[in-house]
Image: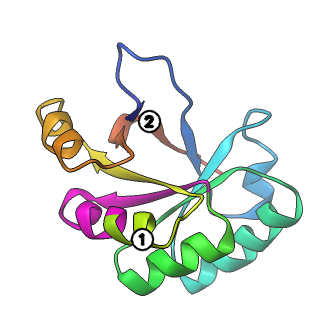
Amino acid sequence: MIIIGHRFVPSENLFHVKSIDAIKKTPPSSCIYLEFCEESLEIVNHARANNIHFALSVTTIAELLYASSLGASYILTQKEFSSIAQNLANEYLFDAKILSIIEKEEELEELALQSIDGVIFTNAIIKTPF
């Protein structure tokens, strides 16, 4: 299981960006984070064209399928949607890893028992000020 943002496990942070210019202000080789929406597609296309590692947060099955097709490295979901997302990812052999967004350590075991690819603690998503 992938664990991002826990104090025991060294891991990368995801940088929540709102523009292409903001990507330039993140550390080199950073993974950028976007919420799936129409406005994010320009940034996604820029990331794809420039081989920039990116994660997309999704809330529906359609968004999940689009995120995989767009080449997201990570697809983030709320805990309640993680099992559905993981089942579809397994069925369709997604390259992306499904990460459930969590806040408390206690949530880790429940998601491990559901065979979710990984978790990301909310503190590992850095909101960029630009």
Which picture quadrant has residue 20? bottom right
- Name the residue type under label 1: Glu
Q: Residue at x 33, y 38 (%)?
A: 121
Residue 77 magenta: yes
Q: Mark 2: which secondary structure?
A: helix
User: Residue 7, image x and y in percent?
Assistant: 35, 16
Q: Secondary structure at mark 1?
A: helix
Crowding around mark 2 (Cα neighbors within 10 Å: few <14, some 14 to 19, many 20+) is some
Image location of residue 1, percent across then percent down: 37, 35
Q: Is residue 106 left or right of residue 59?
A: left
Q: Residue pushed farthest right?
A: 50
List x then y, in percent, for residue 37: 53, 80
Above or below — where is 61 with respect to 90?
Answer: below
Residue shown at 65%/55% (left/top)?
Answer: 54
In this figure, which residue is indicated by the disc labeled 1?
Answer: 91
Q: Is residue 130 left or right of residue 126?
A: right
Asked where in the image residue 2 lies, by quadrant, the reply is top left
- C-alpha separation, residue under disc 1 versus residue under disc 2: 28 Å
**Magenta segment, which residues?**
73-86
The answer to if 95 sits in the magenta stretch is no
Q: Position of residue 72 (x, y in %)?
A: 62, 62
Q: Nearer the viewer, residue 17 or 55?
A: 55
In the displayed structure, would residue 69 be above or below residue 125?
below
Please say which color scheme the image uses: rainbow
Label 1 packing within 10 angstroms: few (<14), some (14-19), many (20+): few
Q: Amino acid at mark 2?
A: Ala
| Disc number placed over residue 124 in the picture, else none | 2
